[in-house]
Amino acid sequence: MYRASKLRYPVPGILFMFVMVLLFLFPLWTLVRLSGSARSWFSGLSLVWREQGFLASLITSLHLALVSMFITAVVGTIVAIAFRLFPIPGRQFLLRAMELIVAFPSFLVAFSLIYLYGSRGAVTVGIQQLLHLQQAPFDFLYSQTGIVMAEVTYYLPFMIRPLLSAIELLDGSLFEAASSLGAGRLRQIWRVLLPLSLPGITAGAILCFLFILNEFGILLILGSQRTPTVPVSIYNRAMVNLDLPGASQEALLMLVFVLVIYLVYRFSYSRAERRFSEKLQRLSLDSAPLISKGRSARILGTATTLLVAIAFFLPVAVVLLSSFAKNWVGTVLPTSFTLHWFTSLQWDDWGSIITTLIISTIVSAIAAAVGLLGAWLVANRQGGEGGLYDTVLTLPQTVPSVVIGLSLLMAYDSGRLNFSNSPIIVILAQTTLVLPTSYRTIVVALTKLPQSYSEAAQGLGASPMRAFVRVTLPLLVPALKSAFGLAFALSAGELGATMMVYPPGFATAPIQIVQYVQRGYYAQGAALSIVMLCVLMIVLTLTAGEFRIPFFRRRTRLAERVESPRKSSYNYEALTGKEV
């Protein structure tokens, strides 16, 4: 594992903490300070807590998050086990699709469900015609059922991919021993696989619960007065009712709640990491694979492939079809196709794409630079100081995006640091949200580099800084490209914080798409979504392929001769903070 010699000067740490104070800590402190300015802090919190509207929103948020988490955990565990036990056609392609799901904004999943399960959607009309019904057979899309369906569809890969990585660490000889003692495949799963994977399942379920609890885009599309949630309540109170003190009180309660859950997650993740580390020290991973053989295994593997492919690719296919459909209302499939929706896009639409490109590029570059600095500090600092840096870097991932946006709006809305009418505040908000992903991607790659490389360079007279620049940094180029690509995708699809802070006339593509959907212009919204997704896929392809930064072209050849990842990989464990 890479670990350079301890830094002699505190300048890098001071610079890093200054950036984190600017992005995250100072806005949160402003939120806490101003939430108690109009009335006593505790009395204000108790007043908000007793409000019937907030309690209803909190209960609904918890109910939706718990139900969605349970379904996601159960289905994700079953799919992960199937991926490990059965031969899956196109396994690597499906795993890659799971890793690239971050390029698909969550609100587009809700948008695609409108075309499928709306009152005149394809599935609704198909069942109605098949059964010769006079009315639609169901009407659940704008209820809690529809929201849960959208959340499970979007967050399922966040459970499958990390859990599959944990299951793949299990020694196949354990299952051979259980089989020799007469245990069938189901008994092996129940008595061996699930107990060994339980820490990973718990940590993944808690993380999914946090993400679902903080979800904003899906609720903005499918939510209604019947499904009030805390993030939407904070947004409405701050931006619609202009009640910033009340919104700050709700945001503070939400912040305390998610921080408690985050601490539980860190504890569960630490236990999982320790258990798997102990297993790796005792077990041989060169044992026989767990893949089952036979006709039934192939059938189950093919069925799993079809179900996963439908779950992952159906939303993209629906948005793609609707963007070219001349008319897709009240029919199972589009009646005809046209390019009209693309040619009818206005300058504001293309301007939002350009704005998204510029903002996402700046945000990705800043996040990669700060993430690299943070990863270097974590690798160089021992004990509590390294843990402090790691906590400060990963904490923004657990805070709701609307809370991040509200805290930045309150912190930089007056005085000399008045960015409220500037694109700078959008950059600050998005950088805060995507920075944990960039950091996790880089720190995972950095800690996996052999320490001997840096030691050899320093043994030849290079200073620690020169060894890092000339040896370590070229080896980190694939991870830096992955960090840039992931940050770009997350920034381009960010909605919650951006809607809280964006200045007039500076709408990004997600905001423009949501405005189309809310006005009922679904085809125009689908066309703009396809343009945005094409841009994202181009960027992700460039950052995931063999394209190299010219400055490091010569030195990165060394990476192909050592035991390190040869190609950039969108490390899903890095995204979710799971290094099992």
Image: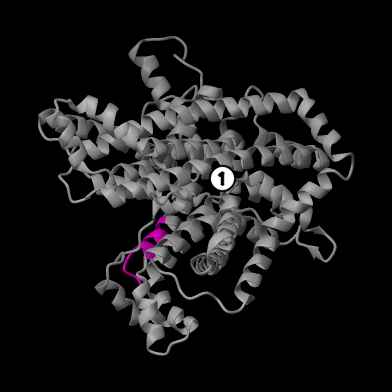
Q: Position of residue 271 (x, y in %)?
A: 45, 43
Is residue 346 among what the camera can see?
no
Of residues 379 and 74, which is closer to you in this image? 379
Taking the magenta stretch, the answer to whether it contains residue 544 is yes
Residue picked out by circle 1: 513
| Colour treatment of the image | one colour
Q: Looking at the rendering, which quadrant does residue 446 occupy?
A: bottom left
The three-letter amino acid code for the residue at tag 1 is: Ile
Mark 1, secondary structure of its residue: helix
Residues drawn in magenta: 537-548
Of residues 229 and 134, which is closer to you in this image? 229
Q: Position of residue 65 (x, y in %)?
A: 54, 30
Q: Looking at the rendering, which quadrant does residue 454 occupy?
A: bottom left
Taking the magenta stretch, the answer to whether it contains residue 350 is no
Q: Quadrant of the N terminus?
A: bottom left
Of residues 39 and 553, which is closer to you in this image? 39
Of residues 265 and 435, which is closer to you in this image? 265
Most extreme residue toward the left is 294
**Number of other residues with Cα within 10 Å of mark 1, as a class: few under 14, some 14 to 19, many 20 or more:** many
For the point 83% across and 36% down, the residue is 42
Most extreme residue toward the bottom is 461
Q: Position of residue 129 (x, y in %)?
A: 36, 15
Looking at the image, residue 445 lies above or below residue 295: below
Q: Looking at the rendering, which quadrant does residue 88 occupy?
A: top left
For the point 21% across and 34% down, the residue is 301
